[in-house]
């Protein structure tokens, strides 16, 4: 999921994300976190088992200086995440807002300096019975993973590398077929140049065009597949991305069918009238595909607008 898609989904699920984070902090909070780092680690281990999108957990003293190490997910620890003790965090929004409020604070999305992911932070100020501020508990979450968790998309993401591998193998096969078609077209061109005959000059160019047209269509199909399914971080739950993929596939088929219809038209003009009916049928098919695609795009965009409302 790319950053733009994450931000869009965040605004869509803003209230749910904030309520979830507030409930996690409220449920996990323990006043002993500020003096027992082992308890903080145990709590982090428990939280990540139930909420795998949580990345960091740490405490600040009353002045905003970090009083514990960065407690990270056990399988996501790097050097920048492990550090943190003694760093002044008093300028960070999660401390400034928590210092001024007695409620649980949830920040807006930002790029984490520790994990370098788009995240949001939740903080809660703790004061003793006398009203003296003891410190602030801070929890960072990976925003993309939190959205996937809320949308029930976690299991599908685990299979994503497998899907990418399968699509990559299919694309390699398609490009191999393109190479064979180009080789066949090149061979026909060479033969036509070396030993041309009147009959070959009338017939072979059409065969060459068919080879090149098929190569173009198959190459465009492979290109679309690798762009949509391998290279791009597509949000399959958003109708616009699915509509874009289908539009590109249908457009590829439409171009190939239209070119083949034109070839049959040319053949009928050059003395093979038996191809005329097939040419007209294929041209009508192209028009039908174009009209159907236009209706699909229009209705799809309209439906997405209604869903957003």
Image (cartoon, helix red, strand yellow):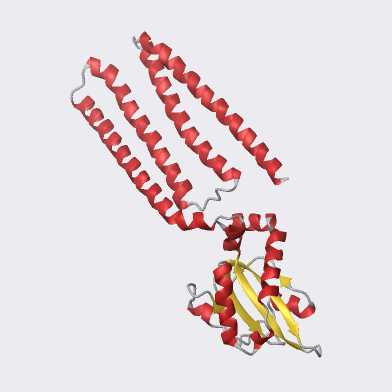
60 versus 171 height, above or below = below
In this rendering, the count of numbered labels is 0
Query: Residue 67: image x %, image y %?
Result: 63, 87
Q: In the depicted view, which residue is nearer to us: 31 or 94? A: 31
Seen from the viewer's position, the closer of residues 297 and 150 is: 150
Q: Which residue is drawn at 45% across and 20% down?
A: 282
In this rendering, the answer to whether 111 lies above or below 239 is below
**Is residue 284 visible to us here?**
yes
| Quarter of image, res 26 | bottom right
The C terminus: image quadrant: top right
Apparent side of residue 289 relative to residue 203 in the rendered image (left or right): right
Q: On the rendered structure, is 169 left or right of 40? A: left
Q: Which residue is drawn at 20% across and 27% down?
A: 191
- In the displayed structure image, the side of residue 66 where residue 208 appears, left or right: left
Quadrant in which the N terminus appears: bottom right
At which x and y percent is residue 169?
Answer: 35, 48
The residue nearer to you, when weighing 161 against 282, is 161
From the viewer's perspective, is 268 left or right of 45?
A: left
Give the residue drawn at x 58%, y 48%: 237
Residue 70 in sight here:
no
């Amino acid at each position: 999921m790319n950053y733009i898609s994450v931000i869009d989904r965040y605004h869509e699920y803003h209230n749910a994300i904030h309520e979830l984070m507030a409930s996690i902090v409220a449920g996990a909070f323990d006043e002993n976190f500020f003096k027992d780092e082992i308890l903080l680690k145990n709590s982090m281990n428990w939280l990540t088992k139930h909420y795998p999108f949580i990345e960091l957990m740490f405490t600040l003293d009353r002045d905003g200086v970090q009083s514990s190490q960065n407690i990270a997910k056990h399988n996501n620890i790097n050097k920048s995440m492990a550090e943190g003790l003694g760093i002044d965090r008093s300028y960070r929004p999660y401390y400034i807002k928590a210092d001024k409020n007695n409620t649980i604070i949830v920040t807006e999305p930002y790029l984490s300096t520790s994990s370098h992911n788009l995240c949001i932070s939740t903080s809660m100020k703790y004061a003793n019975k006398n009203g003296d501020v003891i410190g602030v508990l801070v929890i960072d979450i990976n925003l993309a993973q939190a959205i996937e968790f809320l949308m029930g998309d976690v299991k599908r993401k685990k299979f994503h590398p497998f899907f990418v591998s399968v699509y990559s193998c299919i694309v390699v096969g398609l490009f191999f077929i393109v190479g064979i078609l180009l080789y066949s077209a090149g061979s026909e061109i060479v033969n036509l140049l070396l030993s041309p005959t009147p009959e070959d000059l009338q017939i072979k160019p059409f065969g060459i065009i068919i080879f090149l047209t098929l190569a173009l269509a198959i190459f465009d199909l492979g290109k679309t597949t690798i762009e949509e399914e391998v290279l791009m971080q597509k949000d399959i739950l958003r109708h616009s991305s699915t509509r874009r993929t289908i539009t590109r596939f249908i457009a590829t088929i439409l171009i190939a069918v239209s070119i083949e219809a034109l070839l049959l038209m040319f053949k009928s003009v050059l003395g093979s009238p038996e191809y005329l009916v097939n040419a007209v049928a294929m041209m009508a098919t192209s028009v039908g595909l174009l009209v159907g695609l236009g209706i699909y795009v229009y209705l799809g965009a309209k439906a997405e607008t209604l869903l957003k409302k």
